[in-house]
Amino acid sequence: MTPRIIFAAALVTGVIFAEPALADRIFVSNEKDNTITVLDGQSLAITNTIKVGQRPRAILLSVDGKSLYICASDSDRIEVLDLTTLKIVRTLPSGPDPERFDTSPDGKLLYIANENDNKVSVLDIAAAKIVAETPVGIEPEGMAMSPDGKTVVDTSETTSMAHFIDTATNKVVANVLVDSRPRVATWSPDGRQVWVSSEVGGAVAVIDAATHSIVKKIKFDIPGLTSAQAQPVDIKITKDGKVAFVALGPANRVAVIDTKSFEVQKYILVGQRVWNMAFSPDQKRLFTANGVSNDITVIDVADEKATKSVPVGRSPWGVAVAP
Amino acid sequence: MRAAQYLRAFLGILNREALRWLNQRSRFISALVRPLVWLGIFAAGFRFTLGLSIIEPYDTYIPYEVYIAPGLVAMIQLFNGMQSSLSMVYDREMGSMKTLMISPFPRWFLLLSKLMAGVAVSIVQVYMFLAIALIWDVEPPPLGYIEMLPAMILAGLMLGALGLVLSSFIKQLENFAGVMNFVIFPMFFASSALNPLWRVKESSLWLYRIYSVNPFTHAVELIRFSMYGKFNAQAAAVVGGFFVFFMILAVWGYDPGRGLIAKRGGPPE
């Protein structure tokens, strides 16, 4: 091939591959508007605003990627949004005030934290029935399924504990005391650690999943802010397990943490009161829901930089991205 | 007069300006240190730690350092424009400009060449500043560094032309302190360099109006937008308009027969 042909070929392939088919859709739950905002993953333009139940908080993609589960907290139920028609097609019982939840790896069960009655409810999705309830500490909130599906971790805000629940027996097998007001639990992709954020304690505890002991407490020291302003909430770890992103609430920042050294590498400035986050399916971008500034911020994962913020509804709480 | 002769005169003026900049070590250093003091010290004590709300041309929340960077770029050009033009006070009476002013080159050409030379120096200073500003995460998109070039040329020309007008008023170099107090400081502080206009509007509508008519505000905004790949037509029109206005005044002011120099009793014999 002559250099000119190679150049032309490079140009053509460049044109073809420069714009990957990003059909991603971003879903954001707006706690005060009782809506879900749908944004186009490429243009970040709002394509739909869907009326849902009262006070939508956590949202979660179904394992098959066809539906979005919505915790309609003040309607005391889970709603199922069909991602093709963008209509609520089912409602599921959840127990009172569902806040966060997670699914079993086979997608058949939902584990729901019922903030007001100190229980974790296990919901059979197909049968739309609560099949088990596990009593836990006061104000359960965080809920995280282990990659192997054998253990689910719940955090209770007032008891300040992470409860490890065996999914075979639905019994608590271990309680780990963490700093005050634990909000979110996240498993490392290899299933060896559980990271738990304590909103008031201002720390993230890294718990060894086998021994149930805390191996590291990560604190946040942001120049110019008091330590009380750094209130960690959501935690997202990249698929390769190398980098963790922690949303720091009213500090308006997302901390980037090296998972080997547990050192904070960087703080990324985002919108106000950043709570929950979601990766794009290719993990190139991370979206943050900013509850006070009523917008979402897009973070470039490789560059560790905020690239854009776009307004959504009032009090955006949760975010999910569907391929 | 042929084009080559014009070019030669221009290059001579440019060369002299560059030499002056390089040889005045203190000016060279202070031009670099001044904006860095603002960025590193002032901004640190003044920072909007929780982020500034989103305004054009920014796409997301930014720390204060990122906000003031374009203002500091314009400040470099403001100081440079004043210093370069005020050196005319000395130059036209005993330096090389005296010789040039009595040459057959048209006055507007000589003044414009002087301006362009000053702008070229200021742009080199700006890029040096921006390279160091990376430490504070002031990192516009890569194309922004190129796209801001025309904006800086226009802003630099306007600020330099203003300096020329002022220099035609001034008899002695010692008056630079007066220019600092009565021109540079008010222009810089009553502009969007350090505060977004919406914030000023919240505290005082009158101040907001003063900020809005300050040509320096428009120079800052022109540079700010271009740094992020956006074009601010209003700012460009205002800066361009003021450049033409100041330039006409300067050419008139430097007319030995009619201008301000004549009114002051003309240059010393």
Image (spheres, coloured by chain):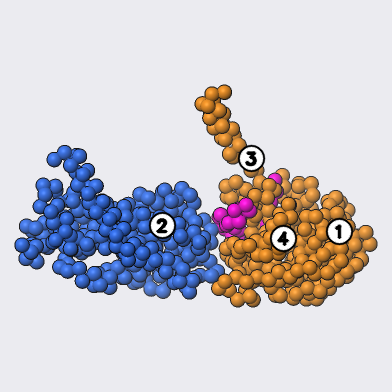
Chain colours: A orange, B blue
Q: Nearer the viewer, mark 1 or mark 3?
A: 3
The secondary element bearing badge 4 is classed as loop
The residue carrying mark 1 is A123
Q: CA distance from mark 2 to mark 4?
A: 36 Å
On the image, which quarter does residue B187 sit in? bottom left
The residue carrying mark 2 is B128
Residue at (76, 47) in percent of width and height: A65
What amino acid is found at the position of numbered circle 4 in the picture? Thr
Query: Residue A121 or A215: which is nearer the viewer?
Result: A215
Residue range (magenta): A294-323
**B205 is within the stretch colored magenta:** no
Mark 1 or mark 4: whose residue is earlier in sequence? 1
The crowding category of the residue bearing disc 4, from other C-alpha atoms within 10 Å (few below 14, some 14 to 19, many at least 20), is some
Q: Is B208 above or below relative to B140?
A: below
The secondary element bearing badge 1 is classed as strand
Q: CA distance from mark 1 to mark 4?
A: 33 Å
Mark 1 or mark 3: whose residue is earlier in sequence? 3
Q: CA distance from mark 3 to mark 4?
A: 31 Å
The residue carrying mark 4 is A259
Q: Is A187 above or below relative to A4?
A: below
Mark 3 or mark 4: whose residue is earlier in sequence? 3
Specify the farthest residue to the right: A169
